[in-house]
Image (cartoon, rainbow, N blue to C red):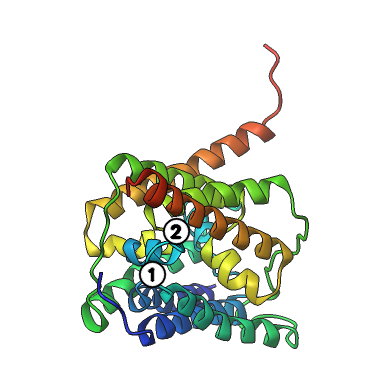
Amino acid sequence: MTNRILASIFCGILFGIGLVVSDMINPARVLAFLDVAGDWDPSLAFVMGGALIPSSLAYAIKQYRSRPVFDTEFHVPTSRSIDARLVSGAVLFGLGWGLVGLCPGPAIASLVIGRWETVLFAVAMIAGMFAYRKAQSGQSAPLRLN
Amino acid sequence: MAHLNYIWPLSGGLLIGLSAAFYLLLDGRIAGISGLTASAFGWTGAGVSPLGIGFIGGIVGGAAIAFTYIRHAELTIVSSPMLLIAGGLLVGFGTRLGSGCTSGHGVCGLARLSPRSLVATATFMAVAAATVYLMRHLIGGL
């Protein structure tokens, strides 16, 4: 378990460095990429393209391995159903992302910059996750009739 | 906002991809930040996850290292407090409902050619672009 946690810290560090180096943490850069009808900035296409090279390679290597280095099995989602939850979740996320220009990774990484705006956004984001958790546990709770 | 040499987004992207690659091959998991954040709080149904805490703490540490030693990023944020709160709530709730964000669906999902992630990524990209269009060119409030 210790190795697994150390690996997650290591991967988090790489991810955090990547977000700052790529300028993904800058909402103005993200919005300029999303603004296809304005003065379009293609930077984020380079981030996405660059990220897909090592990750695609890793998923290709995974085919030839029965287990990861520090765990007994892979924990990769197997669901293939495209349902209303998936699409409506993506719609809500896209709306929030387009409004501000921050997605979850940059929202967390930008906390170290010390700007109140990103702190406010991150707190609201975590509140949104909590609200989802509450809504979900409310759904699965047994019905009480009285 | 100054133009950025494309070597920055490209090398940053490579680092993000490397992170996802190592997380898959070492821990066997998806480097999806929305799921990892929720798991750090114990909101994914499996209790508080030390891996989630480790990864999220790593992001904060890595960002601090890069900000101090590699690239002093300048953030431009023009959104009002109301928009920041609305955007944050939508991103938090939406990524949990849709099981992923830019990293989980965008980077990891596309890399493993998941049809769910392809649909999710196309959807949130299109909706985000439409939102920016609406805000900048139709309402002009952004």
Instruction: Between residue B93 and residue B131, name the one nearer to us.
Output: B131
Give the labeled residue for mark 1.
A24
Residue extending furthest toward the top: A146
Residue at 60%, 62% in the rendered image: B121
User: Which amino acid lies under the numbered mark 2 shown in the image of this protein?
Assistant: Pro
- Does B22 sit above or below residue B123? below
Q: CA distance from mark 1 to mark 2?
A: 11 Å
Report the disc number at residue B119: none
Question: Viewer-nearest of labels 1 and 2?
Answer: 1
Q: Nearer the viewer, residue B43 or B127?
A: B127
The local crowd at label 2, few if under 14, some if 14 to 19, many if 20 or more residues have their Cα within 10 Å, is: many
**What kind of residue is marked 1?**
Met
N-terminal of the pair, mark 1 or mark 2, is 1
Left or right for A112, reference B111: left
In the rendered image, residue B42, in percent from the top left (x then y), is placed at 52, 51
Vertical placement of B80 versus A14: above or below? Answer: above
Residue A108 in sight? yes
Residue B23 position within the rendered picture, expressed as x and y whole percent measured from the top left: 55, 77
For image coordinates 41% across by 76% down, the residue present is: A43
Horizontal side, residue B69 vs residue A97: left or right? left
Identify residue for label 2. Answer: A104
Q: Is residue B42 visible?
A: no
| Among the 4 quarters of the image, the one containing residue A145 | top right
Q: Residues within 10 Å of mark 1 (few under 14, many from 20)?
A: many
Secondary structure at numbered mark 1: loop
Q: Position of residue A105 (x, y in %)?
A: 43, 64
Discs 1 and 2 carry the same chain letter:
yes
Q: Residue A53's quadrant in the figure?
A: bottom right
Quadrant, the N terminus of chain B: bottom left
Helix, strand or loop for disc 2: helix
What's the chain of the residue with tag 2? A
